[in-house]
Image: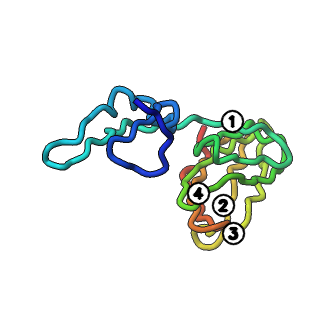
Amino acid sequence: MTEVTITSFTPSTTIKSSEVNTNFSNLATQGGKEHSAAGKHGIIEPTATKQNLVTVADAATMTLDLDTGNMFVTAPLGGNRTLALSNVDVGQAFMVRLVQDGTGSRTITWFSTIKWSGGVAPTLSTTGSDVDLIGFICTGSGQYDGIVIDQELR
């Protein structure tokens, strides 16, 4: 049996499970279905996709690397901070859990071109140790919809 890397599906092509995105780590057990006499191809039956919670260190500029995950939690904000992004794909949804330090009243300068409800960026919770959960969808190159999921989580 010859093993190849594929870029498009071709019947009877064999791939190594290590070459498939780790979200399909169960490929070896679910990928063995055959082409049926009725002309239907077997498929991989997906399981739940579980995201890693990526911790972002406190810094003057905190960059969310969207190649590492879609769910981010900040270390407690030690001052007013700037949020930046890297490796975003159009259509990608992600969220960030912003944690106030014991002092509270820390602010975020958001990355550019976000459409917020009513055209106004949210005011973060001000109490020390409060948590705000904010979501985003990349709607185009450098274009985002911002959604306040919840605030003042304690």
- How many numbered circles does the render carry? 4
Spot occupied by residue 146 in the image (x, y as percentages of width and height): 60, 61
Query: Toward the viewer: 74 or 92?
Result: 92
Q: CA distance from mark 4 to mark 3?
A: 11 Å
Q: Amino acid at mark 4?
A: Phe
Using the image, tell me which numbered label, if any, was put on residue 136: 4
Which of the marked residues, 1 or 3, is nearer the chain's N terminus? 1
Which of the marked residues, 2 or 3, is nearer the chain's N terminus? 3
Whether the residues at callouts 2 and 3 have beta carbons within 8 Å, the answer is no
| Residue depicted at x 75% and y 54% | 84
The residue that mark 2 highlights is: 122
Q: CA distance from mark 1 to mark 3?
A: 24 Å
In what element is the residue under mark 3?
Answer: loop
| Residue depicted at x 51% and y 38% | 21
In what element is the residue under mark 4?
Answer: strand
Residue at the outermost left position? 38
Instruction: Name the front one of labels 2 and 4.
Output: 4
The residue that mark 3 highlights is: 113
Query: Toward the viewer: 6 or 86?
Result: 6
| Residue depicted at x 73% and y 42% | 100
Which of the marked residues, 2 or 4, is nearer the chain's N terminus? 2
| Residue depicted at x 44% and y 33% | 2
The residue carrying pointer 1 sits among few (fewer than 14), some (14 to 19) or many (20 or more) residues within 10 Å by Cα, namely some
In screen coordinates, is 31 left or right of 105?
Answer: left
Query: Toward the viewer: 24 or 109?
Result: 24
